Amino acid sequence: MTLSRLSIHHFRNIDASDLTFSPGFNFLVGPNGSGKTSVLEAIYYLGHGRSFRTHLISRLIQHQENAFILHARTQVCERSLPFGIQRNRDGTGEVKIGNDTGQKLVQLAQILPIQLITPEGFDLLIGGPKYRRAFIDWGVFHVEPQFYSVWSRVKRLTKQRNALMKTARSYNELRHWDAELAPLADQIDLWRKKYIENLTEIASSICDAFLPEYEIRFSYSRGWDKDTDYAQLLANNFLRDQQLGYTHSGPHKSDLRLRIGNTPVEDVLSRGQLKLMVCALRLAQGQQLSEEKGKQCIYLIDDFASELDCQRRAILATQLKITGAQVFVSAISADHIAEICDEKSKMFHVENGKITPV
């Protein structure tokens, strides 16, 4: 699965650009603020229906324009599929896939699985559990067709339960909701646990290549005691949850813990090593998707040289080539990506929102 073409209109500082890409490596080179990251952001938006830099639509639309439009073509098994998205300044918009309009954002994610590596990506390791849950759920979403609908239902039920607890006089008023919530939460837990078990073997192998001096341990925490039935836990914790004003335990509290010995990785690794660790996890997810579903994800790497010396850039470059996936890389200088370039690569010079093939 590759992105063969991308058209950008009125997005960030890019007025209009129509780009064709290599199925291998594509490099965006230019000074800071030129628009390199905006190209990566446009691709990411097509695969997620949101930006990785802001939640404000107004910041994505060019000044004095009413909307931005992103249109692309992806190659799937020698078949070309056009798709695109338009977002208006008032928050409305439209998703089009093939000749069908009115499609949902979740369908874009299924078409274009994307892994993003940015200088701010350390949140995966040093941030709160929500970042690691999002990491797990990206993988489960792509391998379990029912995950999205089940997880959406769990979140709605939990929200309704929290609201009801504010007025409930006894647990009997919540029993009906919990009878539906508990089995769905158990199913989410089973999917996540299975996914992490399968991912760990792949991730450990890549971590060994990136950080051979350390043995990284992976452990999954489901969000409540492993030996306690969730339905019973909800009943037992009713008074506590009511005092807190929300459901304390559940799949909304699950986490992925990464340790060296008994110490969290963020307390041992340097920033350069943390970036390699993040890269290892992202590459492992892409490899697992390829092995389980036969689909290649696309890798977006913003500021390739950030936090990495020449040796570590070479290690990352080697692993990226092994994936055989399509990769988009931004860099300030062509010297930073010299070890990745080959005859199949495409390079673009970016300056003041103008993108020119080199």
Image (cartoon, rainbow, N blue to C red):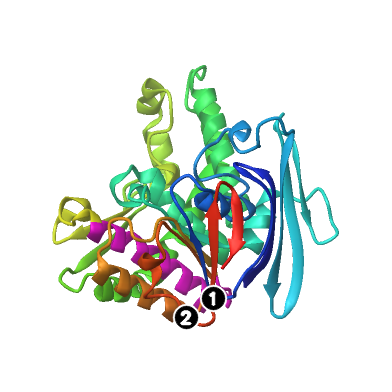
Q: Which region is colored magenta?
A: 272-296
The mark closer to the camera, 1 or 2, is: 2
- Amino acid marked by disc 1: Gly
| Secondary element type, mark 2 | loop
Q: Which mark is residue 40?
A: none
Q: Which mark is residue 342?
A: 2
Residue 278 painted magenta: yes
Identify which residue is drawn at 52% across, 17% down.
167
Q: Is residue 99 left or right of residue 286?
A: right
Identify which residue is drawn at 85% across, 59% down.
99
Percent of width and height locating residue 154: 55, 43
Lower sequence index among marks 1 and 2: 1
Q: Nearer the viewer, residue 256 or 158?
A: 256
Percent of width and height locating residue 157: 57, 37
Residue 67 painted magenta: no
Q: Which mark is residue 24?
A: 1
| Secondary element type, mark 1 | loop
Identify which residue is drawn at 38% across, 40% down.
233
> In whole angstroms, how far apart are the C-alphas of marks 1 and 2?
10 Å
- Amino acid marked by disc 2: Asp
- How many marks the image carries: the answer is 2
Residue 170's place in the image compared with 97, above or below, is above
Q: Is residue 97 visible?
A: yes
Percent of width and height locating residue 10: 69, 42
